Image (tube, grey):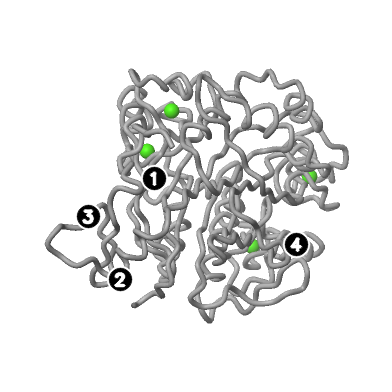
């Protein structure tokens, strides 16, 4: 693969990860006068696998619009999205904000007309394995979920989106798609689209501040059918050298666009909590999947949590939400992926970024920077690996800085060239090491 000059840890295949006292020290090269450790021998024998998430902003105003654009093959935005994927060359890739249609044609044509064609000399990106499933976005709930006094039943309006199981003006908007160079254990995939929020013990259900009863913003039929996942939650086991790595994919709702009841902030928190419980032994027994299977992940199983998780660890509306995952006992404490472009844009764009406490080199999204109303640039997109069975050898955010030959793929933030999010990756070697060994 080509060299990547926008991440800071592009040392894939050159250095070993070193494990000491249970902590990962990244980027330590094996010295000549020391026998390699067991982990070093394992990581030397197996290639690193690049896991990436990319919110590709391929959502469109109407059903069928993305399919038409993928068929035509002439979308400048989709070409830049494709080139970013080609330049970073992930092996395992989750796309967020890719409109879903049941035939799978939009994804197939995105592969054929964009990913598998070379852009500006970049090597085509070929993914023989895909996973696609319905999303809750834009699926009519039949009840007045946004509590504006009416049930909006006709797709196409904001009101309709507000009454859907997940916000979307038509079924399938803002959905997800999964691509892999490694086979998927299809019979073992689990989806959690129908899991009800009220079935999570201690759910942070929102409260109507105008009534004395607690946690009653959703009640009656609304509570009885309210699905936790705003898109879906997928557990996709990928087989790498015959060993399963569970990709845990989701795209929790943004923690805004609501009122004092904080219904979206609370939902974001519990959507992220879902995976924290799923990977923590003893905490996932309440979980059920769409096929009726019960319980969380087997203790010690390899996993990689991936998604636009809509929560920054220090800035924005939902810092506690993402800490549930970053600090989960089963998750590796790998350091945040970084870029030069994120740091450069926070400086150039100023505004809301000036009051952020997080390191701008860790930002993964480029939003409005209005000092009064803008969110600024946030760290929202994550690849979080398990302690067990995976060793990290590098990570990065594809965000070229001004002056970089690939700067045109991201630009200055507005207008959006490719996406308002940046591709985030980690390189992981699959090992037999269990956590604590
Ligand atoms: Ca309504
Ligand atoms: Ca109340
Ligand atoms: Ca910005
Ligand atoms: Ca920031």
Q: Are marks 3 and 1 in contact (CB under 8 Å)?
A: no
* Ligand 2 visible in quadrant: bottom right
Identify residue for label 1: 315
Q: In 3D space, how far apart are the residues under numbered discs 1 and 4 (Cα atoms)? A: 31 Å
Q: Residue at x 62, y 79 (%)?
A: 285
Spot occupied by residue 218 in the image (x, y as percentages of width and height) = 71, 60
Give the percent coordinates (x, y) of residue 145: 75, 51
- Residue labelled with disc 3: 28
C-alpha distance separating marks 3 and 1: 31 Å
Which mark's residue is nearer the viewer, 2 or 4? 2
According to the picture, the residue beneath numbered tag 4 turns out to be 194
N-terminal of the pair, mark 2 or mark 3, is 3
Q: Nearer the viewer, mark 4 or mark 3?
A: 3
Q: Nearer the viewer, residue 54 or 93?
A: 93
Is 262 or 86 nearer to us in this picture? Answer: 86
User: Which residue shows up at 57% across the image and 58% down it?
Assistant: 247
Q: Is mark 1 within 8 Å of ligand 4?
A: yes
**Viewport quadrant of the C terminus:** bottom left
């Amino acid at each position: 693969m080509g060299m990547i000059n926008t991440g800071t840890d592009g040392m894939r295949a050159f250095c070993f990860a070193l494990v000491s006292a249970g902590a990962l020290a990244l980027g330590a090269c094996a010295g000549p006068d020391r026998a390699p450790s067991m982990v070093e021998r394992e990581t030397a024998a197996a290639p690193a696998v690049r896991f990436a998430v990319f919110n590709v902003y391929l959502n469109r105003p109407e059903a069928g619009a993305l399919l038409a654009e993928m068929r035509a093959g002439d979308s400048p935005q989709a070409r830049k999205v494709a080139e970013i994927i080609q330049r970073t060359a992930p092996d395992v890739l989750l796309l967020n904000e890719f409109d879903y249609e049941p035939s799978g044609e939009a994804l197939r044509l995105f592969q054929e007309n964009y990913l598998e064609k070379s852009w500006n000399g970049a090597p085509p990106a070929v993914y023989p394995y895909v996973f696609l499933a319905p999303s809750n976005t834009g699926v009519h709930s039949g009840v007045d979920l946004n509590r504006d006094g009416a049930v909006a039943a006709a797709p196409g309006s904001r009101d309709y989106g507000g009454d859907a199981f997940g916000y979307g003006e038509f079924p399938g908007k803002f959905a997800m798609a999964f691509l892999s160079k490694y086979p998927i254990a299809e019979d073992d995939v689990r989806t959690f689209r129908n899991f009800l929020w009220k079935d999570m013990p201690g759910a942070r259900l929102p409260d109507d501040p105008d009534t004395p009863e607690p946690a009653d913003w959703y009640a009656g039929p609304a509570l009885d059918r309210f699905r936790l996942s705003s898109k879906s939650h997928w557990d996709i086991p990928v087989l790498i050298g015959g060993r399963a790595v569970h990709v845990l994919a989701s795209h929790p709702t943004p923690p805004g666009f609501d009122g004092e009841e904080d219904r979206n902030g609370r939902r974001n928190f519990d959507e992220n909590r879902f995976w924290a419980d799923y990977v923590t032994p003893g905490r996932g027994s309440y979980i059920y999947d769409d096929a009726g299977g019960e319980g969380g992940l087997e203790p010690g199983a390899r996993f990689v949590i991936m998604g636009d998780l809509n929560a920054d660890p220090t800035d924005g509306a939902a810092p506690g939400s993402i800490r549930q995952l970053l600090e989960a006992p089963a998750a590796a404490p790998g350091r945040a992926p970084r870029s030069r472009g994120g740091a450069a844009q926070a400086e150039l764009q100023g505004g809301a970024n000036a009051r952020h406490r997080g390191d701008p080199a860790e930002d993964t999204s480029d939003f409005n920077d209005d000092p009064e109303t803008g969110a600024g640039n946030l760290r929202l997109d994550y690849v979080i690996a398990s302690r067990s069975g995976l060793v990290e050898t590098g990570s990065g955010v594809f965000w070229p800085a001004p002056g970089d030959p690939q700067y045109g793929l991201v630009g200055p933030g507005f207008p959006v060239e490719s996406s308002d999010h940046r591709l985030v990756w980690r390189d992981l070697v699959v090992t037999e090491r269990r956590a604590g060994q």
